Image: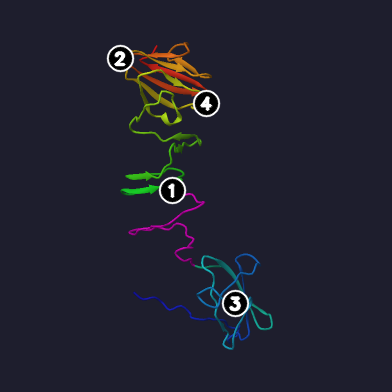
């Protein structure tokens, strides 16, 4: 593979075609009158003067910063304007490239961190892994993807911005006899009195209480809470039948509906 050799030195000409000896090259941030630095080499260490003064052949070493946009103003040695060119965009390096509408096929991107940005549009593909905080907007398609690195009690927002805790496909077991926030989405497997406390749950939180006892088990209404027997106006502590299952759903501030093998 070969490429066209770029112009090794910048050379400028007067309107009559002669080299613009002693001419002046001013560089600014695109669309402004704010000076923007250029450099004497690709290393980007030694800055040019601004303006850059052209030599006896109308040449100079002119290197732009990567991923920047310039306005260039060319004047003669006697300050006569030759031309102005604005919005000269430069390419970025792999570490600083700014790109829109770029399609990448048949390759691998690794070790890339996207910050203060939003990934939009449809995202689809074959088996792969999406790790940690990926924020998606509009309609997305994730096909055969594994999302990992989520903290405990991570949430997914609906279109109204309401967050929902990511649950389990199974219903993990807990041995707590006082329900805790860590029990949301789980089942408490108990043989003794179990309490639903206040100040722990919010609307939508749910858990099961499963009795392992051949005798009834009391589900205690904690101080400041209300346990309502589903389908009735009855409130207070509930009784779970031997080997029974009670479903406990928080429906509002310290209010819970209890259904199942309970009275």
Q: Say which of 219 and 59 sits in front.
A: 219
Kindly indicate the quadrant of the structure image that contains residue 74: bottom right
Say which residue label 2 marks.
214
| Closer mark to the observer between disc 4 and disc 3 | 4
* Residue 46 visible in the shown view: yes
Q: Is residue 224 left or right of residue 194?
A: right
Q: Is residue 118 magenta?
A: yes
Residue 91, label in figure:
none
Say which residue label 4 marks.
199
Q: Which residues are magenta?
A: 91-120
Q: Which mark is first along the chain, 1 or 3?
A: 3
Decide: marks 4, 2 in contact (CB < 8 A)? no
Q: Say which of 207 and 143 sits in front.
A: 207
Q: Is residue 69 above or below residue 166?
A: below
Q: Which mark is first along the chain, 3 or 2?
A: 3
Q: Give SS at disc 1.
A: loop
Q: Is residue 65 magenta?
A: no
Furthest toward the bottom, the residue is 56
Kindly indicate the quadrant of the structure image that contains residue 139: top left
Near mark 4 (Cα within 10 A), the count class, few <14, some 14-19 or many ≥20, is few
The residues bearing labels 3 and 1 have C-alpha atoms spaced at a distance of 43 Å
Residue 177, percent from left and from top: 41, 23
Q: Give SS at disc 2.
A: loop
Say which residue label 1 marks.
121
The residues bearing labels 4 and 1 have C-alpha atoms spaced at a distance of 40 Å
Residue 48, label in figure:
3
| Closer mark to the observer between disc 4 and disc 2 | 2
* Residue 123 visible in the shown view: no
Residue 16, percent from left and from top: 60, 85
The residues bearing labels 4 and 2 have C-alpha atoms spaced at a distance of 31 Å
| Closer mark to the observer between disc 2 and disc 1 | 2
């Amino acid at each position: 593979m070969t490429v066209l050799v770029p112009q090794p030195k910048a050379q400028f000409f007067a309107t009559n075609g002669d080299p613009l000896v002693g001419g002046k090259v001013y560089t600014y941030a695109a669309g402004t009158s704010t000076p923007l630095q250029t450099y004497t080499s690709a290393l980007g260490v030694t800055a040019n003067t601004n303006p850059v003064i052209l030599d006896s052949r109308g040449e100079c070493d002119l290197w732009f910063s990567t991923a920047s946009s310039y306005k260039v103003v060319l004047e003669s040695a006697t300050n006569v304007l030759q031309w102005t060119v604005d919005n000269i965009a430069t390419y970025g390096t792999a570490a600083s490239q700014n790109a829109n509408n770029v399609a990448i096929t048949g390759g691998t991107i690794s070790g890339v961190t996207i910050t203060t940005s939003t990934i939009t549009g449809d995202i689809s593909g074959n088996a792969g892994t999406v790790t940690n905080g990926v924020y998606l907007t509009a309609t997305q398609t994730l096909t055969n993807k594994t999302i990992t690195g989520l903290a405990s009690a991570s949430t997914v927002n609906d279109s109204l911005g309401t967050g929902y805790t990511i649950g389990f496909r199974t219903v993990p077991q807990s041995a707590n006899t006082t329900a805790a926030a860590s029990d949301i989405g789980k089942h408490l497997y108990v043989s003794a009195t179990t309490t639903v406390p206040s100040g722990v749950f919010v609307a939508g939180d749910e858990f099961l209480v499963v009795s392992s006892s051949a005798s009834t088990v009391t589900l205690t209404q904690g101080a400041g809470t209300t346990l309502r027997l589903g389908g009735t106006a009855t409130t207070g502590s509930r009784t779970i039948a031997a080997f029974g299952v009670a479903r406990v759903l928080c429906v509002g501030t310290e209010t819970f509906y209890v259904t199942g093998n309970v009275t």
